[in-house]
Image (spheres, coloured by chain):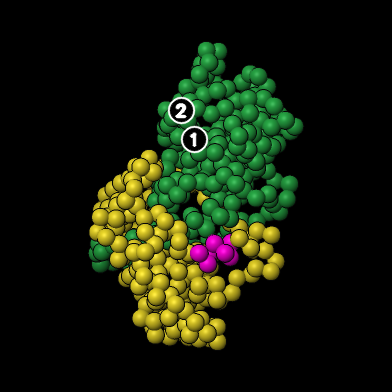
Chain colours: A green, B yellow
């Protein structure tokens, strides 16, 4: 794993730990954290804040028979098996949380061509935010777009550049409200990204604006 | 914001070394309880191990008495109806029993682990599907964690809790609101009163361990 240079913000990690992100963003955060030990440690710190909040919370009394009821519940069910044994990471492009949503690794994705050689695959999530996989041929630009909300773009394979910044496997770009950005896949192999947005993108050129209606982004 | 917690850091310096030595010398659950008692705090790890190793109902009752009312309060505060919260808190505690063998003291304190189970349960209820969780990080060949790492993480967590407890009221309330789901991501991002730097500066040992883990 090459060194990751572009990380999640503290606000995103805290919101993920607090459980207040939409599912689409949860997926991008969980996938990035699977690839990034720095963000994992920060996430654990934000989880620990939740532990401190629970610890410091005055309790609400449980029902009188609650312990007995819980023990009965335990007796009814077998212990959980250990977490899935970590299959060899080598050769896999998608970390486990993404593979769960995509129904497998990169080779299982059912791509939909959306023009200009670009293909996408929308992953099903609840809530207003949406998340999809993007496949961009080397050297091709994702249409120029601004945002009304936030967009997270995580590189899974290949690389793209946006202005002077380069994003490689594991890097995540966090684009906010007023960001107008123009990601261009670096020459060479296809760039595979996981992109989540909480508002429809607004393309700055006429043709892509029409394209937006069928891109569903 | 780091300056706000000189006391917590001072305790880390004075408390660390004797504690770790005594812990390293004695690895049984009973000894671990004794060490915890001398520190006047309870980390609940011995109870969890007793459940894991011996299906110890007495240890479970102690955990239940401590955590179940807190989980219930957390769920109610996060918008769950009281009768649902009662049932759900029981469910969270039953999960604690069934997953006792999966607890990793190098990554979380027991309170933190309880929080993550309760949080995930709350999200699962709303979405009716499992929240995406990061893939477990396999420890590198030379990085198999030991008792010292468990203790280090537990210490850091206690210090974080103390640091949060001594925050000015306004900041503490903000953190609680965030964790009770009352602040959206954009509100968290826009809120300058949240002591994110403080939170980041803690759990540093966990960070160091993780840096070496992926090899």
Segment colored magenta: B204-210
Residue A157 falls in which quadrant of the image?
top right
Tag 2 residue = A147
Q: Mark 1 — on which chain does it sit?
A: A
Give A4 or B34, whichever is nearer the viewer: A4
Residue A194 location (% of width, % of height): 58, 36
Seen from the viewer's position, the closer of residues A152 and B134 is: A152
Q: Earlier in the sequence, mark 1 or mark 2?
A: 2
x and y percent of residue A187 in the render? 72, 30
Mark 2 falls on what kind of element? Answer: loop
x and y, in percent, of residue A6 in the image: 57, 44
x, y percent for residue B66: 33, 70
Q: Residue at x 58, y 65 (%)?
A: B209
In the figure, B67 relative to A17: above or below? below
Q: Are marks 1 and 2 in contact (CB under 8 Å)?
A: yes
Q: Answer above or below: position of A147 versus B141.
A: above
Query: Does any portion of residue B28 appear in the rendered image?
Result: no
Q: Main secondary structure of the magenta part?
A: helix
**Total labels drawn:** 2
Residue B80 in the image: above or below residue B99: above
Residue A111 sits in which quadrant?
top right
Find residue A175 and name its label: 1
Chain where mark 2 sits: A
């Amino acid at each position: 794993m090459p060194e990751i240079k572009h990380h999640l913000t503290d606000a995103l990690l805290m919101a993920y730990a607090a459980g207040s992100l939409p599912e689409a963003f949860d997926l991008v955060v969980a996938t990035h954290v699977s690839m990034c030990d720095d963000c994992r440690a920060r996430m654990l710190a934000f989880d620990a804040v939740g532990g401190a909040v629970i610890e410091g919370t005055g309790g609400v009394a449980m029902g009188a028979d609650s312990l007995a009821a819980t023990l009965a519940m335990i007796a009814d069910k077998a212990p959980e098996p250990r977490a899935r044994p970590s299959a060899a990471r080598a050769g896999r492009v998608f970390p486990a949380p993404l593979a769960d949503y995509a129904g497998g690794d990169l080779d299982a994705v059912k791509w939909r061509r959306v023009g200009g050689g670009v293909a996408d695959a929308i992953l099903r999530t609840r809530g207003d935010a949406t998340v999809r996989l993007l496949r961009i041929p080397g050297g091709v630009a994702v249409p120029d777009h601004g945002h009304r909300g936030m967009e997270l773009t995580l590189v899974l394979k290949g690389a793209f550049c946006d202005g002077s910044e380069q994003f490689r496997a594991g890097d995540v770009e966090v684009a906010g409200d007023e960001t107008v950005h123009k990601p261009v896949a670096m020459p060479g192999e296809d760039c595979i990204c996981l992109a989540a947005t909480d508002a429809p993108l607004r393309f700055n050129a006429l043709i892509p604006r029409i394209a937006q209606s069928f891109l569903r982004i | 914001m780091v300056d706000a917690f000189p006391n917590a850091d001072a305790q880390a310096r004075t408390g660390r070394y004797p504690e770790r030595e005594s812990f390293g010398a004695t690895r049984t659950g009973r000894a671990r309880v004794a060490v915890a008692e001398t520190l006047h705090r309870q980390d609940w790890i011995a109870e969890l191990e007793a459940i894991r190793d011996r299906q110890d109902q007495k240890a479970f009752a102690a955990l239940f008495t401590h955590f179940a009312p807190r989980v219930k309060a957390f769920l109610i505060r996060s918008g769950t109806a009281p009768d649902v919260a009662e049932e759900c808190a029981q469910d969270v505690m039953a999960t604690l029993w069934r997953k006792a063998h999966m607890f990793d003291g190098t990554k979380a304190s027991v309170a933190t682990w309880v929080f993550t189970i309760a949080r995930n349960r709350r999200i699962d209820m709303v979405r009716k599907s499992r929240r995406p969780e990061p893939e477990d990080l396999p420890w590198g060949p030379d990085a198999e964690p030991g008792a010292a790492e468990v203790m280090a993480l537990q210490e850091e967590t206690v210090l974080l809790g103390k640091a949060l407890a001594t925050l000015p009221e306004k900041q503490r309330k903000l953190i609680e609101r965030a964790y009770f789901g009352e602040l959206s991501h954009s509100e968290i991002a826009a809120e300058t009163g949240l002591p994110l730097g403080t939170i980041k500066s803690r759990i540093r040992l966990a960070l160091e361990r993780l840096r070496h883990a992926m090899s």
